[in-house]
Amino acid sequence: MPLQIVTIPCLADNYAYLLHDADTGDTSLVDAPQAAPVLEALRDRDWQLGHVLLTHHHWDHVDALPEILAAHPGARVVGAAADAHRLPPLDTPVAEGDTVTIGREAGKVIDVSGHTVGHIAFHFPESKLAFTADSLMALGCGRLFEGTPEQMWNSLSKLAALPDDTLICSGHEYTANNARFARTVDPDNAALADRAAQVDAARAAGQATVPSRLSEELATNPFLRAGDPDLQAAIGMDGADPVAVFAELRRRKDAF
Ligand code: ZN
Ligand code: FE
């Protein structure tokens, strides 16, 4: 049985996720933005946390950890070994290629540095889930606070190479704004126009726009399309190196 996920809106626009293996009862939390909604989601289902998987050190992904652990003292904390000095205390420091087992499914750690250097993602291939937080986001990607455009492009390229039907579980509800920006750099993309309309409808109905399918991101997310001739032409960078195109897209988004 694939792992179940529960998407938990936290704070103004963050998401945490529960990952649950119905066969063994094992449950994990991905990121800890806010305790109350996470603890309530666990209580409602009578689930106990086995692990907390941390994607990166920013406060809006880790600050609620002590309060969550107080209610789930058996949970083991997993995070990037490279960032152990600025993450909460880790029980299991991990690096790219390491495995995190939830119930009976082994997830792989992927280094997705760029937003921060040390940001990791967790990929569960059997369940077709990737927890990408502030690296690949729905119609966008995280701002480059620490990494270079080349680092983020490499990170996004690793995620883009996962199977097309992978669900991308990202860290924020930024999709409507991302869609408005995307249309400015990829104006003739019909799939993007359709998706932007769906995103607006979902938000108007109070629904989350995450997780999203990798296949839709590949077709519509400008930050994955930096090598696409149509997008390059639309921003006057025909034939340019995708890293340079990515850097220009990120620069424009920062000023959007
Ligand atoms: Zn962040
Ligand atoms: Fe964040």
Image: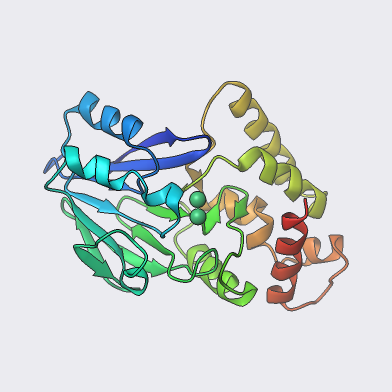
Q: Given the current orientation, which residue lies at the most extreme top position?
A: 205
Query: Is residue 63 shown left or right of residue 134?
Result: left
Q: Is residue 119 above or below residue 172?
A: below
Q: In this view, does 156 lie above or below 103?
A: below
Where is residue 247? Give x, y as percent: 71, 70
Q: Given the current orientation, which residue lies at the most extreme right position?
A: 236
Determine the image quadrant of residue 162.
bottom left
Q: At 48% across and 71% down in the image, what residue appears?
A: 117
Q: At 73% across and 55% down in the image, what residue appears?
A: 253
Image quarter (top left, top right, bottom left or bottom right) of the N terminus = top left
Please state which of residues 138 and 56 is positioned toward the viewer in this rendering. 56
Q: Is residue 207 above or below residue 218?
A: above
- Residue 167 in sight here: no
Q: At 33% across and 58% down in the image, what residue appears?
A: 125
Q: At 29% across and 29% down in the image, what residue appears?
A: 41
Q: Which colour scheme is used?
A: rainbow
- Residue 239 in sight here: yes
Where is residue 95? Give x, y as percent: 32, 73
Query: Is residue 52 shown left or right of residue 129?
Result: left
Where is residue 208? Give x, y as percent: 51, 32
